[in-house]
Image: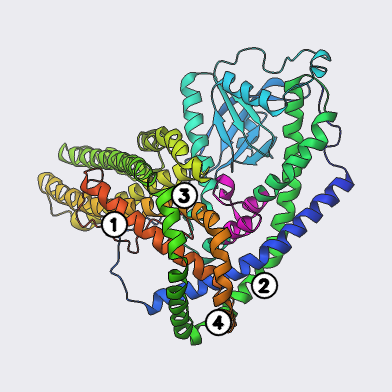
Amino acid sequence: MGGQPSSPLDKQQQQHLRGQVDILLRNFLPCYRGQLAASVLRKISIELGPQEPVGCQLLQSKKLPRVREHRGPLTQLQGHPPQWQPIFCVLRGDGRLEWFSHREEYENGDRPLGSTALTGYTVLTSQREYLRLLDALCPDSSGDHAQEEPDTLLEMPVSFPLFLQHPFRRHLCFSAATGEMQRAWRLALQGGIRLRGTVLQRSQAPAARAFLDAIRLYRQQQGHFGDDNVTLGSDAEVLTAVLMQELQPALRAQTLPSLRGAPRARAWAWTKLLDAVHAAVLAGASAGLRAFQPEKDELLVGLEKTIRPDADQMLRLRARVAGRLRAAVQGPLDSCLHRKVDAQLPPLTQTLLSTVEAELAAVQTLLTQGMGRLSRHLRGSPSGTQLRKEVYSFGEMPWDPELMQICYREAEQSQGRLGQLAAPFGFFGTQSLVFGAQDLAQQLMADAVATFLQLADQCLTTALDRDQAAQQLEKVRGRVLKKFQSDSGSARRQFIHGWLLGIFLPFVLSQLEPSCKAELSEFEGEVLAVGSPALTIEGIYEEVVRGVLLQRINGDVETEAQRGTCSRQPGSSTEIRPLCPLPPPGTLQS
């Protein structure tokens, strides 16, 4: 089979990639340092501001996000030429996939034949869909290559395929023995992909939020407004994806003409070359961030010491400049919102609301059914062993991929519609959005389960008979459902506001840049006089735009709520307040 280079990267190419990583870090790290400073000021501002009541009524689960380990026999397309070979596959709890020649090698603790972190992959179960994707990678415009050899790759039908596709890495092709095994693996792999992808979005650490904000600002400096799925993964993986996007056009132009063989053979070789480039870039980005870590730790300590004494003065200056800047840009900003945003905001709001409401309603249904089963088992006087099994099964509900898919599919089914509505605004991050909605469902389920188990443990004593114990569980169930309804209503609002800002804010900033950026120089001297990286005129300007846009979003969500699109929950409100689940970092706070 043609198309596979004997050595994907020579020394000169590796040296070139190291140079590209160094350039990326030199340009990105100043953005990161600035956002770390802004995060320290943000934290101090929250401490100095009025303390809001705690938003979450449910206990927060102490179990770390994970996927249930999944393992079993598969066949894999591998070798040169590629052939289907039996393997034993294992999905680890951290979302890493490993495969072995035989089950015994896994059980003996031997090294796997291969492994990969699932970050950025997509699972396909249609051979026809995968072949269309493969054909599009290396289109044969001249027709010359097709005559060299027949295109035999995946020419025979595969009954239960599992294709793992990645924009910058080699593809992995597996096949299951039955449709049931295929579905189980698909759900398990999707859980691992989501777990690896949302590690930064889930993080409450200020440095994680600062990193994502820095990525957004760095890309805006490169002229890339809008959002996509490049921010899925760890910090090193995100930087790698950013650079791979920049390198790929030139790499295609230099490499594709030299690949020989049938179109799919060339596509297969292309993905292997990309994988080698991705590995080299990832190694360089990881090393660069590790080298920056001591400086980052020292920087955060120093920023805390320098910013805190002057925080009041800085916040007053920020508010004063923001008021004057808003007056200067209000006209163009209102005009932009009226012409470009107002008409499209309601359908996006409605679609997001209906999606999240359906997902959280499914969570509540599963939670209610699970609590009801425990009550019935207790009332039915089961054996202690059986009851312990039921309690364990209930505690594992948030990590059961088959069960939680009932909730997750609500977001998956809306992905296409959301993508159509958001694409005109340069937003192509619907996979991140869907993952965020699924993480939200899993978090609320985990918190509700933890709350129920703790409250039940507190009220059930040996002095109670079965009927009394069942009655106590019914009371606990009612309390948990009220807490869940309150938290889910709050989380839904936070999620909707955050993602609407994530969709529209970069677009509005891009539209205003030609006309409003000139206004900033008038105020820059006053801000620069403070001499702190935590306060910049660009940051204040973005805060102004965000505030005005947020008013529009608040009004639209209120309108949809009054129309009945957003069902009221106990304690619900359209005001934004601190809540447990977080929206996309950098969207609600400056």
Mark 1 or 2: in front is 2
Q: Nearer the viewer, residue 540 or 123?
A: 540
Left or right: residue 110 versus residue 3 is: left
Left or right: residue 128 versus residue 349 is: right
Disc 1 marks which residue? Answer: 58
Label 3 – label 1 distance at C-alpha:
30 Å
As for residue 219 lying within the magenta part, the answer is yes
Q: Which mark is residue 503?
A: 3
Disc 2 marks which residue? Answer: 295
As for residue 141 lying within the magenta part, the answer is no
Mark 1 or 4: in front is 4
Q: Which mark is residue 526?
A: 4
Q: Which mark is residue 92?
A: none
> Whole-percent x and y of residue 297?
61, 72
> Whole-percent x and y of residue 516?
53, 64
**Contact between labelled residues 2 and 1, with CB atoms less than 8 Å apart:** no
